[in-house]
Structures are given as structure tokens and as C-alpha cells.
């Protein structure tokens, strides 16, 4: 998905913070938890309690309904309350969840799921195939107005049915291997259909899932508390029930500075992302955690499924003739000092690249090394008939204010090989329209995956996706590429061969360079050093099932 379309501006409102405190009174040997508005007594002790994981959301959580899980803050909570048929493993592989296994038909148009027998809803009722059918078809119900119906675009109308209590069959219009990956999104969560159909039940604030936690308390613009689900089906390798935590406490404080302060004070156990306001405070020039923080915090990051790139409209009226020559485009790519830009302008919070598909989608852990090569850039220009940039018209690069610093650096690098580039900074809405209509020769964009299959990136270069009706803004087309794409889509049950096709397509895009890839973003988390067994996902999902915290002297909920 176009990252500049995906992220919406968040409304600001006055936050209120609930503090989670311990009731010092014991009744029948149990410690009772209470939730008080404001700064109640004992809050410092609660912040250190190893049984409670605490973090902040900078935007209000307005719904707990999986059908409305369109933003990351909603997805994180839904992931704690619900399970889907399948989920993503640490290497982006699709692994069992409520479905123990599945099989595609020979032509790849039918997928049959077998459900586990030990998963129950909060009501105590076992999950059945009817619950799955209800949950997925609900995404297409006009009365629900879900933003997630698109995950079923490949599914035929009425194509989801229960064969028996523990078997679900899904029929696709045609083979579509990424379908399983789409079911790993929060939209694919399975709901207690029996309770959801009850008159007056609202899934917005009364979740009905099988996840590792259950809702204990929630006020949308203040925060929420989740308690451990004692009926959760999953166990660790030793047979111990998950999750290990007893509770999750989420504040809603929209001031990013307050969030950072909360981490420094030990109030929060982690923060996600690096806001410019405190990036330099936390990280040195190499992008490592500064020494004075290393005894208290840990920096964790993995490549994100997001690519920043420069696109060229290959058939645009405003595109200089020289830019239609791929040697010129390669010369512009070789001239960029991506490593230096990542270090000086982004504190190494991004990974330099000259390939479009994030490496984890192709089975690799890191992008291939890419270095600035001015000699090769000049050689390519000469081979194209433009030595020293002669005969190349001024190139106009369209961007928004978010990327002015980066584009100015590009401009400086290109000047070294004789190319004149003018930066055109426009509002985001104007930029989107100009790019979609092909009204600019060159543009800065980002592409963010909706699902973990590389098809999500490679589909960008299909003729059927030509802008303005699709995201192929460059109007790139290659018959061999289209053929490879079709062959990959036919390999529903052979992910290794499909990945090989994807790698060939990525190499073809690199060779023709209708876009100049720049950086793959990173998922970055700053953790308290008390947090154990943290798992960081390339799609930035939050998995708290196996997370633990150092006790630091706590015994049965009280300090020694």
C-alpha cells in the first residue's frame, strides 16, 4: 500500500492517564487490582510489577472490533484479544493458529482448514467452523462497514462455508497464493458468532475472542487494561500455559515527549519508533543506543516491509528523453550515497538498498550491500551519450516537506555527475494527485506492505495497475515480467519456487529500474532491560504471549 495514503493524520485531544495501582488490602489471600483516575498511591510500585506489561499509545483506541482494525494501535490490541485461523511466524511464514492445518486443491482455488479442538471463547464455548464463516463474511457485510473486506477480494461470493464443526472451506475465483497471508491480518480474527448475534451486543467495546488476554477495563481516550486469559489454548515448549504476564496496561497519551519521559521514569516497558524529537537524544551517529542508556534499555530493530523509492514516469510528457534510458536511471542510482544519507539524516534507522522488495520477503535477512559509485555513474552516462550530463534536460523531482532534507542531498550527489535536478516541494495532496496523473517526471514515494507476500510489492509493476487506476505510477511494462508473475500465482503450494519467481522479478525491476529504490525502513523498539523474550516482527505486530519481566525483588506481587 502507498505509505503516504495509508497513514492518516491523527486527531489531537486532551489526554487523561489512568494509573494502575495495587490495593494494599488482601481478601482471602488475593491481591485485588483497582484502577484509579489520576496519580494514585502505589503507582511507582505498580510500574515495577513484573506481572504487568505497560506501554503507551499516542492515538485514541476507538474500537476493539477486528473489523475496524485499520491502524496499528487497534491491531496491537486486537492481537491480544483474538486469534485468526493462521498467523505470521518470525520469518514471515504463515503458521497455524486456530487452524491446525490446511490444504489447497490441485488448481489452487479451494483451501480447506481443519480447526483445533482446544480453543474456546471467553464464554467457554469451543470454536467451530460456523464462527469462522461468520467472522470472515462479516467483513463483507455492508451494515458492518468494515475497512477489511479487501482481504476477501479473491474469495467468491458465498465462497466460505463450514463442511462440519471443525472444517472450513474457502473458494477463490482463481489461484491466489497470498491469500493465506491476508488471513494473518487482524481483520482475519475469529469471533464468537453466537454471542455476537445476540441483540444489543456491540463488538466495539465487548470483544469476543480466544486471544491470550481479555478486556478488563477500557476508556477510549484514556487507556485500557487487559487481564490474562486463563482459557487460552497455547502452551510453551514445556507445556506451561501462555501468556506468562498477568496483565497489560495501555495508556493513551498523545504527547510523544510524555511517552519518552514515561520510558525514562520506568513507567513504560517499551516504545515503538523513533520520534525526531528524541532520536538524537537516544542514538549516536551510527544509530546505536547511546552509552548512558545501554544499562537501562535495549534497542531492537528488524527491516520493515516498507521501501522508499524515486519513481520515474517512463511515458510522461514532462519526462526528459534521457530519463527513458535505463542507463541514465542506473547512473542516478549509482551516484547516491545511501549509506551516508542513512547515517547522517536518519541515524541508521533505515537500511540502504537499490532493490525494491524487502529482503525478508525473499528469504534474506539483510539487503544487499549498495555503495556510491561515481565512476560507474559517469561511465553509464557516457554510454548513454551524455558524458558529464551533457544533453540531459533539467529534471524536476516532486516531493513533500517530509523529505526535503533527503531530496536536497540527492540533488547534491547528482550534481557530481553533471545532472541538474530541481526540487519541487508541494503539499501531500497535490503530490499524490500529480503522481497519480503522471504530471511529474520524477517523484519520491514509499510503498508499505499490506500482507507478507512479495506479490504485494511486485504487483506494483503490472500493466493492469497503471496509474491513475492503480499504483504503477511509472507505467512500467515488460511481457516477461507479466509471465513470471502469472507463473508465481500458480504456485500456491510451492512457496520456495514462488519465491524464486519473485526474486527473478525483483532482479528484472532492478535491471530496468523504473524506480530507484532508496531505503527499507526498520521496525525499531526501545525496551526496558527488564523485558525478556521480546519478539519483534517485520510487520510490527505486537506479540506478548511469551514476554516476561525481571522480578527485581518482587515476591507474590509485593516488594521484599
Image (cartoon, rainbow, N blue to C red):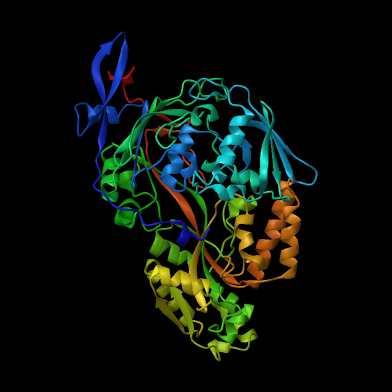
The picture places residue 293, in percent across and down from the top left corner, at: 32, 44
Looking at the image, which residue is at 28% across and 52% down?
12
Residue closest to the far right? 106
Q: Nearer the viewer, residue 220 or 321?
A: 220
- For this orientation, the residue located farthest to the front is 199
Q: Residue at x 65, y 72 (%)?
A: 512
Q: Is residue 347 above or below residue 14?
A: below
The residue positioned 44% from the left and 78% from the top of the image is 411
Give the farthest residue toward the top. 28
Q: Position of residue 73 (x, y in %)?
A: 41, 44
Residue 57 coordinates in the image, percent (x, y): 35, 43
Instruction: Classify the position of the C terminus by image quarter.
Output: top left
Asked where in the image residue 456 lies, by quadrant, the reply is bottom right
Query: Most extreme residue toward the bottom, as rendered?
Result: 391
Examine the image and state in which quarter residue 380 appears. bottom right
Task: Residue at 35% x, 25% y: name it.
Answer: 551
Rendered view: 182 above or below 465: above
Report which quarter residue 63 is drawn in: top left
Amino acid at each position: 500500500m502507498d505509505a503516504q495514503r495509508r497513514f492518516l493524520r491523527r486527531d489531537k485531544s486532551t489526554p487523561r492517564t489512568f494509573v494502575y495501582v495495587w490495593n494494599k488490602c488482601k481478601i482471602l489471600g488475593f491481591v485485588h487490582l483497582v484502577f484509579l483516575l489520576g496519580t494514585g498511591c502505589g503507582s511507582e510500585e505498580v510500574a515495577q510489577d513484573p506481572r504487568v506489561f505497560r506501554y503507551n499509545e499516542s492515538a485514541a483506541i476507538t474500537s476493539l472490533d477486528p473489523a475496524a482494525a485499520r491502524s496499528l494501535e487497534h491491531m496491537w490490541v486486537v492481537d491480544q484479544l483474538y486469534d485468526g485461523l493462521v498467523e505470521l511466524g518470525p520469518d514471515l511464514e504463515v503458521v497455524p493458529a486456530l487452524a491446525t492445518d490446511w490444504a489447497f486443491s490441485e488448481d489452487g482455488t479451494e483451501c480447506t482448514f481443519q480447526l483445533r479442538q482446544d480453543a474456546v471463547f471467553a464464554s467457554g464455548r469451543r470454536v467451530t467452523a460456523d464462527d469462522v464463516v461468520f467472522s470472515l463474511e462479516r467483513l463483507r457485510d455492508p451494515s458492518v462497514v468494515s475497512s477489511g473486506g479487501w482481504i476477501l477480494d479473491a474469495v467468491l461470493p458465498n465462497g466460505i462455508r463450514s463442511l462440519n464443526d471443525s472444517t472450513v472451506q474457502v473458494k477463490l475465483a482463481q489461484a491466489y497464493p497470498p491469500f493465506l497471508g491476508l488471513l494473518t491480518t487482524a481483520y482475519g480474527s475469529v469471533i464468537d458468532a453466537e454471542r455476537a448475534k445476540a441483540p444489543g451486543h456491540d463488538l466495539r467495546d465487548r470483544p469476543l475472542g480466544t486471544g491470550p488476554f481479555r478486556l478488563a477495563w477500557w476508556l477510549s481516550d484514556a487507556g485500557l487494561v487487559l487481564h490474562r486469559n486463563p482459557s487460552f489454548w497455547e502452551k510453551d515448549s514445556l507445556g506451561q500455559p501462555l501468556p506468562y504476564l498477568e496483565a497489560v496496561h495501555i495508556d493513551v497519551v498523545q504527547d510523544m515527549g510524555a511517552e519518552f519521559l514515561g520510558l525514562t521514569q520506568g513507567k513504560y516497558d517499551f516504545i515503538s519508533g523513533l520520534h525526531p524529537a528524541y532520536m538524537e537524544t537516544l542514538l549516536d551517529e551510527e544509530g546505536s543506543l547511546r552509552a548512558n542508556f545501554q544499562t537501562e534499555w535495549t534497542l531492537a530493530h528488524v527491516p520493515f516491509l516498507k521501501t522508499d523509492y524515486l519513481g520515474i514516469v517512463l511515458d510522461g510528457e514532462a519526462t526528459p528523453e534521457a530519463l527513458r534510458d535505463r542507463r541514465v536511471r542506473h547512473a542516478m542510482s549509482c551516484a547516491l550515497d545511501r549509506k551516508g544519507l542513512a547515517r547522517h539524516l536518519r541515524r541508521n534507522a533505515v537500511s540502504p538498498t537499490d532493490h525494491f522488495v524487502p529482503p525478508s520477503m525473499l528469504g534474506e535477512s539483510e539487503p544487499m550491500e549498495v555503495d556510491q559509485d561515481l565512476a560507474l555513474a559517469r561511465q553509464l552516462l557516457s554510454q548513454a551519450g551524455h558524458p558529464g550530463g551533457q544533453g540531459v534536460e533539467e529534471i524536476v523531482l516532486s516531493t513533500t516537506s517530509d523529505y526535503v532534507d533527503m531530496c536536497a542531498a540527492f540533488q547534491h550527489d547528482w550534481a557530481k555527475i553533471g545532472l541538474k535536478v530541481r526540487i519541487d516541494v508541494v503539499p501531500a495532496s497535490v503530490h499524490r494527485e500529480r503522481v497519480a496523473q503522471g504530471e511529474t517526471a520524477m517523484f519520491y514515494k514509499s510503498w508499505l506492505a499490506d500482507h507478507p507476500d512479495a506479490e504485494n510489492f511486485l504487483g506494483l509493476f503490472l500493466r493492469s495497475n497503471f496509474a491513475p487506476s492503480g499504483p504503477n505510477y511509472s507505467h512500467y511494462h515488460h511481457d516477461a515480467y507479466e509471465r513470471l508473475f502469472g507463473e508465481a500465482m500458480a504456485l500456491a503450494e510451492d512457496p520456495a519456487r514462488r519465491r524464486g519467481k519473485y526474486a527473478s522479478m525483483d532482479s528484472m525491476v532492478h535491471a530496468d529500474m523504473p524506480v530507484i529504490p532508496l531505503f527499507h525502513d526498520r521496525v525499531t523498539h526501545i525496551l526496558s532491560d527488564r523485558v525478556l523474550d521480546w519478539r519483534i516482527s517485520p510487520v510490527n505486530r505486537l506479540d506478548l504471549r511469551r514476554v516476561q519481566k525481571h522480578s527485581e525483588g518482587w515476591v507474590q506481587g509485593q516488594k521484599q
